[in-house]
Amino acid sequence: RVVVMADMELAHIAAFAGEPGVLVIAGTGSAALGRDGRGRLRRAGGWGPLLGDEGSGFWLGRQALKDPRLSKLWPVDKPLRVGRGDNPIRATAALAKTVLRRAARGGDAARVLRRRAGAELSKLACAAARGLRAPVPLALHGGLFKDPGLRRDFLNALPPGRFAVRTPAMAPEAAAAVLALSPTRLRKR
């Protein structure tokens, strides 16, 4: 028997063990996935770099490349090299680390950009939580949330009392293994 699902759905199952809640993903891309008590899903974002990914690593990198105040972080020809490289999306997203390091060291322009990213991710969480009663269980997933400043900016941008942050129940890899052994164990229909 084979179970096919989006990686975002698997990460949600891992975070909440099939229970209701909102998962926000912030890595190269960004998205949020909410599940209500009946198992219905509500997606926000996740449309890729051409149509969205607000608050993601790609978004941070693209905004930083366009910001004249942050241009001193890399050589003048960096935007051209990134855009014409083998994988411009990954290369652009990789710039987020530089922006976040700069923000942690007190760079004003980088801090403003980091706060904007947190606000954009907050909008995704709120959109995915529509119809869920507060406090909505909330789990965070993706490499950008490892940055304490971005994580703090995201949490500060959320409406007070709307969400309750929780630690994921298990890693997505563990959830995949459980689903492989017992497909109905973690997925509520």
Image (cartoon, rainbow, N blue to C red):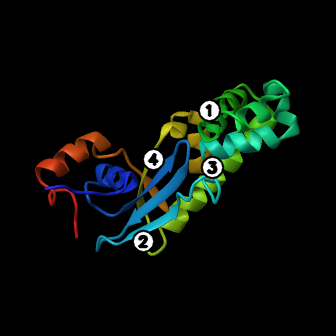
Is the residue marked by circle 2 packed among few (<14), some (14-19), or many (20+) residues within 10 Å? some
Answer left or right for 166 relative to 186.
right
Residue 5 screen position, x and y as percent: 31, 57
Q: Which residue is disc 4 drawn over?
A: 140
Marks 4 and 3, Cα distance to the nearest angstrom? 13 Å
Marks 3 and 2, Cα distance to the nearest angstrom? 23 Å
The one nearer the camera, 131 or 24, is 24
Nearer the observer: mark 4 or 1; the answer is 1
Nearer the observer: mark 3 or 2; the answer is 3
Q: Classify mark 1: helix, strand or loop.
A: helix
Mark 4 or mark 1, earlier in chain: 1
Marks 4 and 1, Cα distance to the nearest angstrom? 20 Å
Mark 3 or mark 2, earlier in chain: 3
Is the residue marked by circle 1 packed among few (<14), some (14-19), or many (20+) residues within 10 Å? some
The one nearer the camera, 159 or 29, is 29
Residue 92 screen position, x and y as percent: 66, 37
Q: Residue at x 16, y 57 (%)?
A: 183
Marks 2 and 4, Cα distance to the nearest angstrom? 17 Å
Nearer the observer: mark 4 or 3; the answer is 3
Q: Which residue is disc 2 drawn over?
A: 132
Q: Classify mark 3: helix, strand or loop.
A: loop
Residue 55: mark in rendering: 3
Is the residue marked by circle 3 packed among few (<14), some (14-19), or many (20+) residues within 10 Å? many
Mark 1 or mark 3, earlier in chain: 3
Q: Classify mark 2: helix, strand or loop.
A: loop
Residue 159: mark in rendering: none
| Amino acid type of the residue tagged 4 in the rendering | Leu
Q: Which residue is disc 1 drawn over?
A: 94
Residue 48 screen position, x and y as percent: 57, 54
